[in-house]
Image (cartoon, rainbow, N blue to C red):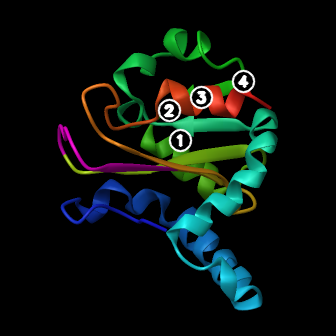
Amino acid sequence: MPLSSADEDDMEYGYKLGAIISFIQKHARMISEEPSQTGRRYLKYYNKNVPLVADKVVLVKQEDLSPSINSAAKISSVYRKTIEIVTEDSIVDAIKQKAPGKLILHMVSPAGDASSGYCFKMLIGTDDADMYYYNQHMIDRNNPKGLLPSDLKRLSRF
């Protein structure tokens, strides 16, 4: 599981470490029981949980959204389920409280205004530390870093 880009400050994702470490521990147990599920491409295994996202609230920071969906109004034109644009403190609280029915977005991409590289996106449950969604894309002019409308459309299919 990508944790951060090489040039990213640890403080950029440190507030999510509780949920990330819990997921990694669960993933390690799964791999020990099923060694064939190793490697980054096997994180897509967790997309089996995508249909469950519809019953959850997705918590995101505004800076983790691509410009085309960086407001509630823009999100609602693509995705009819619940996404809340929240502060880092709200995400920390949800993780600490193991808030039921909440997912956090963990995004890994090059720092700054990157115009190339990979952007990895993962939705992790605050209460169960399960991964509900994994995807990646190449950053370019048409697909900037961040959660994209295509991600929301994919989540909407269920």
Alpha carbon of mark 1 to alpha carbon of mark 4: how far?
A: 19 Å
Q: Which mark is residue 152?
A: 3
Quarter of image, res 70: top left
* Residue assigned mark 1: 90
User: What element does badge 1 sit on?
Assistant: helix
Q: Amino acid at mark 1?
A: Ser
Q: CA distance from mark 3 to mark 1?
A: 21 Å
* Magenta-drawn stretch, dominant element (helix, strand or loop): loop
Q: Amino acid at mark 4?
A: Lys
Query: Percent from the top left, x then y, of residue 104?
Result: 58, 47
**Disc on the earlier residue, 3 or 2:** 2
Q: Residues within 10 Å of mark 1 (few under 14, many from 20)?
A: some
Dividing the image into 4 quarters, which one contains the C terminus? Answer: top right
The front one of 107 and 31 is 31
> What segment carries the magenta color?
112-121
Of mark 4 and mark 2, the one earlier in the sequence is 4
- Front label number (3 vs 1): 3
Answer with the quarter of the image where residue 84 lies: top right
> What's the distance in space between the residues labelled 4 and 3, CA to CA?
9 Å
Q: Which of the numbered marks, if any, corresponds to residue 86?
A: 2
